Amino acid sequence: MSTAAEKIAAVRANIRARDPEQKEFLQAVDEVFESLTPVFEKDPKYLEAFERLVEPERQIVFRVPWIDDNGVQQVNRGFRVQMSSALGPYKGGLRFHPTVNLSVIKFLAFEQTIKNSLTTLMMGAGKGGMDFNPRGRSDREVMAVCQSFMTELYRHIGADVDVPAGDINVGAREIGYLFGQYKRIANNFTGVLTGKDLRWGGSLIRPEATGYGCVYFAQNYLKYKGESMKGKRCVISGSGNVAQYTAEKLLQLGAVPITFSDSNGYVLEPNGFTQEQINHVMELKNVKRVRISEYCAFSQTAQYFPGKKPWEVPADLAFPSATQNEIDQEDADTLVANGVKGVFEGANMPSTNEAIEVYKKANVMFGPAKAANAGGVAVSGLEMAQNSQRLQWTREEVDSHLERIMKDIFDNSLAAAQAYGLKDDIQAGANIAGFLKVADSMLHQGCV
């Protein structure tokens, strides 16, 4: 008979052999697998559940043809990976970016499974998108792409089946175009998407939720360590939705957000961004849709560093809020050398596994994405609840629910880590707590 270690190694080898070219997906699986080894050793039934979980329930790949403003045909590739419905309808965002491929969508859907479980809400997990770059495209072109995308996607989604939301480059504008096309084809006004406009079924706090939630998570971790946010200098990467509202909530809690970035470089406010300055960043990125370097025309104190990452700036806390694998081992070494004591992931998997090892060796507080950035999908779940009730909750109600959910995620992750003798390894605890809820549900529902 095989030993437990041999069975674990065999399952891991089988997963890698099945999709050897899917590096992002395998990176995400490896990170979780490492954390779950003590769970598998204690009870082998969970290893069987994991082997099923990493194979999506359904993978949909489709053509997205559309006509640009010059009358020329364009063709993109669309994806929807429906990872797990063990806890409820598939739930997860849509990403429009030239880097989108099946590996990226599978990694996001897998991470989403653990994340949605941690929220304590009844949501399964999925993820989707297409390899479309919206930069430089007109509103009419974006509408045409969204309508073509939804013309295929609509047959695979529904309020009790699969409820997509936004992600990178899919904001209020895109959600509106997607919802309008769904409604036209299905002849049905239902809560089939989240991130909607407030006037037709959206939720207050939804745009802010991922950033606010990440800061709430960090606040809970700091409190556990006997510290507070007040006066902490914080480096933030990205300048989109997550970064903007991370900065806003940090400011509200007395911290000092000092950077924003995009793929061309970063901007530094040595004394910290004020609310007025954050509002200007929002206008530049959400309305004018220009590069972050344009901010320097607004501020006399700002400094712009082209081609650089903000991790070279000395700080207390770091909030990577841009994209996957933006912090590698060298960046992590730089963060630690610059005095950073906590890294809280607003983006999905922004730290490589090598970077995470650097954090752990330096005893840096680490809030992994699936826990720290779960606020967005948590409020999406609350939007689904409001849609079912045909009600809209107040801003205070939603924010109160969000703050409680983020505290529960931290507390449950810590408790799971301690239950398996892992002290305060929040990364491992989040993986364990999220996985066990899904795995137990899968086992109760049979081999399906």
Image (cartoon, rainbow, N blue to C red):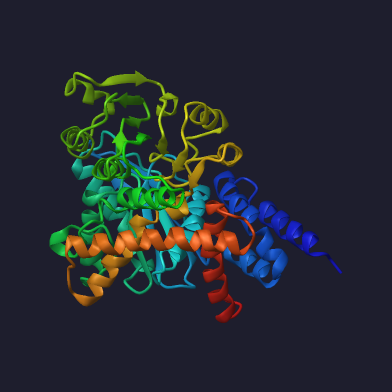
* Towards the viewer: 185 or 400: 400
Residue 82 seen anywhere in this rendered image of the structure:
no
Quadrant hosting residue 264: top left
Q: Is residue 317 left or right of residue 274?
A: right
Q: Quadrant of the N terminus?
A: bottom right
Quadrant hosting residue 227: top left
* Towards the viewer: 241 or 339: 339
Q: Residue at x 39, y 51 (%)?
A: 129
Q: Is residue 395 left or right of residue 117?
A: left
Quadrant hosting residue 257: top left
Q: Residue at x 48, y 49 (%)?
A: 368
Q: Residue at x 25, y 75 (%)?
A: 388
Q: Residue 260 location in percent, x, y?
A: 32, 32
Asked if residue 300 is positioned above or below residue 150 in the image, the reply reads above
Residue 92 seen anywhere in this rendered image of the structure:
yes
Seen as rendered, the residue at the extreme front is 226
Q: Residue 355 location in percent, x, y?
A: 56, 37
Q: Quadrant of the C terminus?
A: bottom right
Q: Residue 244 location in percent, x, y?
A: 27, 41
Q: Residue 180 location in percent, x, y?
A: 20, 60
Asked if residue 88 is positioned above or below residue 227 in the image, the reply reads below
